[in-house]
Image (cartoon, grey):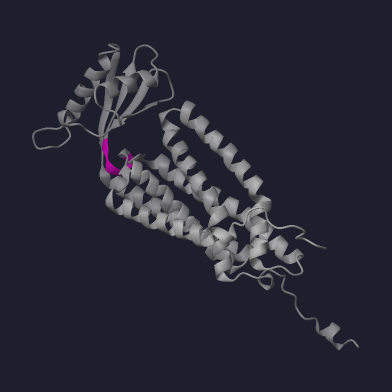
């Protein structure tokens, strides 16, 4: 059976020096950005203040958020508490909310936020003012980092078992690339990084590996079917034959994330943006980075052929 009756449409492996060079440059730039500019951690990580606003009549979250924004509290996180009359407001304390020693004064917090909201809605009353410690945020940041590491390692072990160690190494390298570049872009634009964004980074890891597994499956299939073909030819053919599937999946997932961004509200906006970044980065790495790493590691047909055990009974037969 002749598998390769025509050349690959795009010679992706021919661009491997450029693609790997760009990938390394992006990783280095991302590390520099993360350590110099740093991530703009949200309230869950840095601490802040939280109050509950209770209205006598139904209120829209957007109205309360607009009032706070006009007062200079642009990064306040406003969410509904399950009904149409109670809102949760979380934000970094302003100078007017602190006492002479610089500590947060919960009475001033209630007074300042209450006065801002009453400008547009006099029927509001505030309760449940509390200060959120940054110590909890440090623990969350540590736990989130550990979770990401374990996810990547678990994926590597799975691919080692399902395919071969070279595939696991290639997947781990590209996953680290995808996470670093995604975080680097977030650090560059200084978008707030909260628990929602952390969850989306973990989702990016899962989404990214899904693209790579599809390409890896095709590589294994073509290696086993082809009688004679160079590894570079097989890798090129595998990328091209799964290219439409990769692009369509990424496109429709991106459309879903765009819908979440525009109509999902502030609560899921960060998740959608981070996922959009991760989808683009993960898709490009599946096409331009993973397979060149496999070629560099020396993947070959014999690495993917089923292992057969010698049968002593058959050996004794004439």
Q: Can residue 197 be spotted in the picture? A: yes
- What is the x, y in percent for residue 162? 64, 63
Compared to 271, does 125 lie above or below?
above
Q: Can residue 158 be spotted in the picture? A: no
Is-magenta flag for residue 206? no
- Please give the range of residues in magenta: 44-48
Of the pair 251 and 81, the residue shown nearer to us: 251
Specify the quadrant that holds the N terminus.
bottom right
Specify the quadrant that holds the C terminus.
bottom right
| Relative horizontal placement of residue 145, taking residue 306 as reference (left or right) | left
Compared to 216, does 253 lie above or below?
above
As drawn, which residue projects farthest toward the left?
100
Residue depicted at x 55% and y 34%: 256
| Relative horizontal placement of residue 252, taking residue 105 as reference (left or right) | right
Residue depicted at x 77% and y 69%: 227
- What is the x, y in percent for residue 58? 40, 14
As drawn, which residue projects farthest toward the right?
318
| Relative horizontal placement of residue 302, taking residue 138 as reference (left or right) | right
Of the pair 309 and 190, the residue shown nearer to us: 190
Compared to 47, does 22 lie above or below?
below
């Amino acid at each position: 059976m002749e598998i390769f009756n025509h050349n690959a449409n795009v010679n992706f492996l021919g661009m491997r020096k450029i693609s790997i060079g760009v990938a390394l440059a992006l990783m280095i730039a991302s590390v520099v950005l993360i350590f110099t500019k740093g991530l703009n951690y949200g309230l869950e990580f840095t601490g802040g203040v939280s109050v509950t606003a209770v209205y006598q009549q139904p209120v829209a979250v957007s109205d309360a958020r607009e009032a706070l924004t006009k007062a200079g509290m642009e990064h306040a996180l406003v969410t509904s508490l399950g009904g149409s009359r109670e809102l949760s407001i979380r934000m970094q304390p302003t100078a007017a909310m602190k006492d002479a020693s610089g500590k947060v004064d919960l009475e001033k917090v209630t007074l300042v936020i209450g006065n801002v909201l009453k400008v547009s809605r006099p029927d509001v009353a505030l309760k449940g003012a509390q200060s959120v410690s940054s110590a909890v945020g440090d623990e969350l940041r540590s736990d989130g980092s550990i979770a990401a590491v374990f996810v990547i390692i678990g994926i590597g072990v799975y691919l080692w078992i399902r395919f071969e160690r070279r595939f696991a190494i290639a997947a781990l390298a590209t996953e680290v690339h995808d996470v670093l570049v995604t975080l680097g872009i977030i650090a560059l634009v200084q978008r707030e990084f909260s628990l929602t964004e952390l969850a989306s980074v973990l989702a990016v890891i899962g989404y990214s590996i899904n693209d790579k597994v599809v390409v890896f499956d095709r590589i294994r299939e073509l290696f086993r079917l082809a009688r004679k073909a160079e590894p570079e030819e097989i890798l090129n053919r595998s990328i091209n034959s799964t290219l439409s599937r990769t692009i369509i999946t990424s496109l429709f997932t991106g459309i879903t994330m765009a819908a979440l961004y525009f109509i999902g509200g502030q609560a899921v906006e960060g998740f959608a943006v981070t996922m959009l970044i991760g989808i683009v980065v993960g898709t490009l790495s599946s096409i331009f980075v993973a397979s060149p790493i496999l070629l560099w590691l020396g993947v070959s047909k014999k690495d993917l052929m089923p292992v057969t055990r010698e049968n002593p009974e058959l050996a004794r037969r004439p």
